[in-house]
Amino acid sequence: MIQYQFTNKRVLVTGASRGIGANILQSFVRAGAIGLLHYWDDPKGENRHDAQQLVETLKISYSASLPNAQNGSTNSEPICHLISADVRNAPEVEGMMKQIQSLVGGIDILVNNAGILRDRTLRKLSIEDWHDVMETNLTGVFHCCKYAQDLLAEGGRIINIASIAGITPFHGQSNYGAAKAGVIAFTKVLAKELARRKITANAIAPGVIQTTMLGELKPEVMQDYIRQIPLARLGKPEDVSNAVLFLASEESNYITGQVLPITGGWLA
Ligand code: NAP
């Protein structure tokens, strides 16, 4: 496994209380980064609870890894700040970025991961399903980039978690596919506009990754997916994290405006 070092890099990951986002955030913190763990403060407080649990887990695994001094960090505890906002809400996102500025002074790496899925055929797709997905998955990315841009350090990174659906959407994904295709186009524009500050912007297009977003997949549906994937398995959150860390590393500083599918060869 490649040991990247992100010592004291300030990394904001949206939607990081669970799923792919949680895995990305943990991978950065274990590599010495200062984590900015964004979650959506739902009325029941479940995401806050998950986010706090994640920090506790990180503390245990981090101190266990310290004797090896693999991450180059001088910290004896992981540094991970919890921050909340609804990415659909521009004033909340603006407030979150001001909070980050006063906490850590800026951002080195922004990972836009928060997203939702509401698959329905056009006949069944409600106006609400359309707007919820567009506002979370596309407008949310715009809000985070817009209000983070002045905080991003020269040479910084933006990594947007799009989807293979943004390239080849499926039946029932008109909202999701359109939003993720929008994220891909938006990322390419960011790459051009931010290049003068040596900030790179890339998108990742995962295929089928095992998280709660998939819901309770029936075994036969899962087998059908696996049959179509050349590498013959569903993706894991760490398959996505590994690509994110590469795109955030120094080694990728000439890669910008690109989309990287993480699909096990599916739809290649
Ligand atoms: P997940 O487990 O459902 O996590 C999504 C995260 O986004 C949750 O923490 C969620 O918070 C947060 N979120 C949703 N709406 C939000 C809002 N309005 N404001 C702030 N945060 C919000 O899903 P995942 O599978 O890890 O997906 C992560 C990303 O990967 C998404 O962008 C998704 O589209 C993309 N992706 C996933 C797959 C896959 O197969 N899993 C494939 C391709 C792309 P709540 O807990 O409140 O919902």
Image (tube, rainbow, N blue to C red):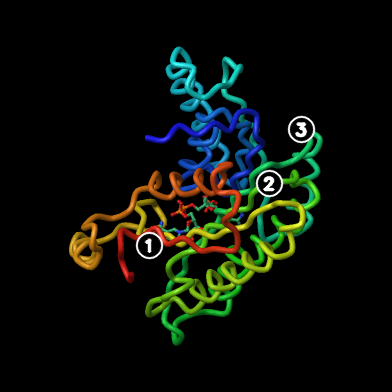
Earlier in the chain: of badge 3 and badge 2, it is 3
> Between tags 1 and 2, which lies in front?
2
Screen quadrant of the C terminus? bottom left
Q: Amino acid at mark 1?
A: Gly
245 horizontally vs 238: left or right: right
Q: Is mark 1 within 8 Å of ligand 1?
A: yes
| Disc 3, SS | helix
Disc 3 and disc 2: Cα gap in Å?
18 Å
Q: Is residue 70 above or below residue 247?
A: above
> Residue drawn at (43%, 67%), measured in percent from left and top?
164
Which label sits on residue 241? none
Disc 3 and disc 1: Cα gap in Å?
35 Å
Choose between 243 and 196: the one closer to the eye. Answer: 196
Earlier in the chain: of badge 3 and badge 1, it is 3
Which residue in the protein does label 3 denote? 103
Residue 263's x, y, as percent? 35, 60
Which residue in the protein does label 2 denote? 156
Q: Dot 3: within a 10 Å radius of its alpha carbon, few (fewer than 14), some, or many (20 or more) residues?
A: few
Residue furthest to the bottom: 123
Q: Amino acid at mark 3?
A: Leu
Earlier in the chain: of badge 1 and badge 2, it is 2
Residue 116 visible to an observer of this rendering: yes
Number of marks in the image? 3
| Disc 1, SS | loop
Q: Amino acid at mark 2?
A: Gly
Residue 155's x, y, as percent? 70, 46
Kindly check if marks 3 and 2 are in contact, taking CB atoms under 8 A apart as contact.
Answer: no
> Between tags 3 and 1, which lies in front?
1
Residue 47's x, y, as percent? 54, 43
Which label sits on residue 207? 1
> Residue drawn at (41%, 75%), measured in percent from left and top?
168
Q: Is mark 3 within 8 Å of ligand 1?
A: no
